[in-house]
Amino acid sequence: MGIGYAAAAMWWRPSPERRFRRDKYADYFQCIDRNGNGRIDRNDLGHYASVVKERLGLAGDSPELSRLRATTQALWASLTGPIEGSDADSVRFDELVGFFVELHERAQEDGALPRAARDHVLATFAVLDRDGDGLIDVDDYGVYLAAIGSDADPREAFAHLDPEGAGRLSMQTIEQRYREWVSAGDPAVGGNYLLTGRLPE
Ligand SMILES: [Ca+2]
Ligand SMILES: [Ca+2]
């Protein structure tokens, strides 16, 4: 009985670090659920691709647009693939939070990013790296933020990811920032900005 009570108290009153992580995951969900129907599915990622297409004036038959469609599709698959839900074609809020909580716990245990996290970070990197040259600059990042509907200032957010001012982020740096994004409970950590460009409210 005492254990049940303690578990319930923990659920209702999570530590500030846990609450902060959960709020981050929630903000990310809200950003990628572009049509706000409480599920992440193909339509949301299709919306992402159309915003980028319009913003950059990409022609319907351009290689940039094909690449964009392929990378957003892979990003969607990286989230729906490892999450077993009642409906394999979409991801609910609680499923996505569960996914990140598990990544966090597994990374705490053995320090390595689980396979599912690696797929998600690779897919995110490919979406960010529009020209496929293996580096992300502030313009790439700004396009991503606009397309997920984040109101963050890209320069300000980028500075948190790139404190030394190199101007470009490699896959290795993005992976490091992704680990921070998943696990940091301290708002001062730069990686908190990675997926949404901002701290949760
Ligand atoms: Ca949706
Ligand atoms: Ca690039």
Image: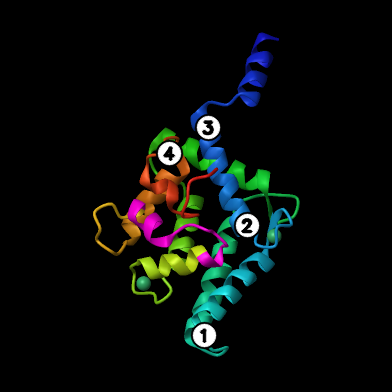
Identify the disc placed on residue 161.
Answer: none
Quarter occupied by residue 75: bottom right
In 3D space, how far apart are the residues under numbered discs 2 and 4 (Cα atoms)?
28 Å
Task: Give the x, y percent position of residue 15.
Answer: 53, 26
Q: Which residues are magenta?
A: 146-160
Residue 67 placement (x, y as % from top left): 49, 78
Give the residue pinned by disc 3: 18
The answer to which of 98 and 83 lies nearer the viewer is 98
Q: Secondary structure at mark 3?
A: helix
Amino acid type, label 3:
Arg
- For label 3, the crowd category at 10 Å Cα-Cα, with few meaning under 14, some 14 to 19 and many 20 or more, is some
Which is more N-terminal, label 4 or label 2? 2
- Tell whether label 4 touches label 3 (CB within 8 Å): no
- Marks 4 and 1 in Cβ contact (< 8 Å): no
Q: Which residue in the protein does label 2 denote?
A: 80
> Which numbered disc flags the more N-terminal residue, 3 or 2?
3
The answer to which of marks 1 and 3 sits earlier in the sequence is: 3
Question: Which residue matches tag 1?
Answer: 58
Query: Mark 4 highlights which residue?
Result: 187
Name the image quarter holding the N terminus: top right
